[in-house]
Amino acid sequence: MKIVKYILFFILILVNISNSQVIDTVAIVNVDNYSKPAPNQLEFDIYLKRTSDKWIYFANSTFHLKFNDPSIQLNANDFQIEKITTSLPYGIISGGNVTPLNGYISSEKIINNQMSIGILGPDTYQESILIPRDSLYLLGRYRITALNNQYLPKLLNFENPFNYYQAIAYKTDKDSIVDNAIVWFHPDDNIELNQDPSLFVSYNINAPEKLPFILEFFKVEYLTTLKNGITWKTKSEYDLAGYSITRALRISQIYNPNGLTYDTILTWKAGEHYNSAMIGKGNSPIGNFYGQFVDTIQYRGVEYCYRLYANFIDEYGKIKPDTLLAQVCVPIPNAVIVEAKPTPNPFADKTTIQYKLDDDVYLTVYVIDPTGRIVRKLNDRETGQVLDNKQQARGIHSTVFEPPPNVSVGVYEIIFIAYPINDPSIELSRSIVKVVLMR
């Protein structure tokens, strides 16, 4: 009778120990660092973190993931998964071995509507990788591509139940019993972490970081010969499908740019004004530069207003409506010769006339003396070429008037005549500069 009581007492003790068993989280697996190099691609990292000293050497693992969106049905014909990089040393299988002689090999497949990622390590713990305690170790960075160009969101899940679809094994370096298990393990055995109910592996899908879209600048400037140059730059760029630019004519500053009628001149969308350079260049934490796009305009003496729009992509791959990013108006010069200034004036020996052209022109410059006669044509100061219907670029130039020593003193007129290039709206532009010769 006493023997029976002792046996019952011993069983009760074991039951109490079992019921009070502490669950120890010995490892954490994280999916993190999502990026989308293209709308039909998703890249992500899988990290392993050892949080216990009950294991040290990583042996192998199997992971099964799928998209959170049930509309995405994975199959091997339309999807492809590949490993980009890993912190694990690469292994080699040779001869009749089924495991690598050293290092690790991996297998990535699309099967049963899942991404299946398997990692196989070497036979011995001496050749296995020691996972540092409480540090993230990169098992691999992976890229999944929809070969049918389907948009892929940044929402993944580990397949459930975890104990069936997910597994991590480690190597032991000595004979041991794992906690309360009755199986005896030998050195170099692969021991699954979920084999002991007191050991818990946490599988986490880190939420994608919501990164901002930041426009650094949107710039439109008059170039020359009725052409505007358009450029812009982003400081950071995420989840963008593409851009569109619209333009409106503003004949007076009394009109509010917000009330003008804008027409599309460039867009990433299919149609008459499609331009492939308007498609977003991809996610970037440092942004992208776009341009220069050249827009040919029609009129002088007015303003042209431009708007930059963007179309963003939501988490399900749908294109959002147009978002206005920036608006700018640029004045178009009316006169071609906008400034001509002699220095010094009056002068004794020579004077330099600096002039500004607001467009590319054919330019003629000549001098009229106090009696009204044309006495000479002047030269471009930089090139030395005679300014006689000579093509000159938009910008600042100069010429020098140096009369001979025996000419009369008095008022001389420097005549500038400019013919705009490819602009029938203006026949010519004329400027007269009066200079005084005193000796």
Image (cartoon, rainbow, N blue to C red):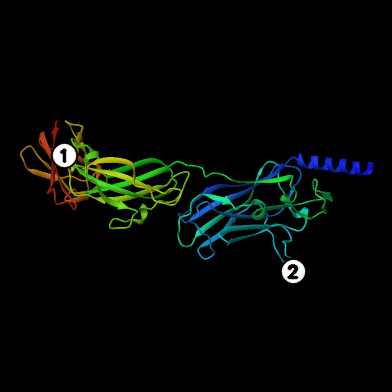
Classify 110 as above or below 256: below
Classify 273 as above or below 220: below
Q: Secondary structure at mark 2?
A: loop
Q: Amino acid at mark 2?
A: Gly
Kindly identify which residue carries mark 2.
96
x and y, in percent, of residue 324 in the image: 33, 42
x and y, in percent, of residue 363 in the image: 18, 48
Residue at 30 percent across and 58 percent down: it is: 271
Kindly identify which residue carries mark 1.
403
| Gap in angstroms between the C-alphas marked 2 and 1 | 99 Å
Q: Quadrant of residue 54?
A: top right
Residue at the outermost right position = 2
Judge by depth and name the residue closer to the eye, 281 or 343. 281
Classify 271 as above or below 246: below
Q: Secondary structure at mark 1?
A: loop
Looking at the rendering, in which quadrant would you find the C terminus? Answer: top left
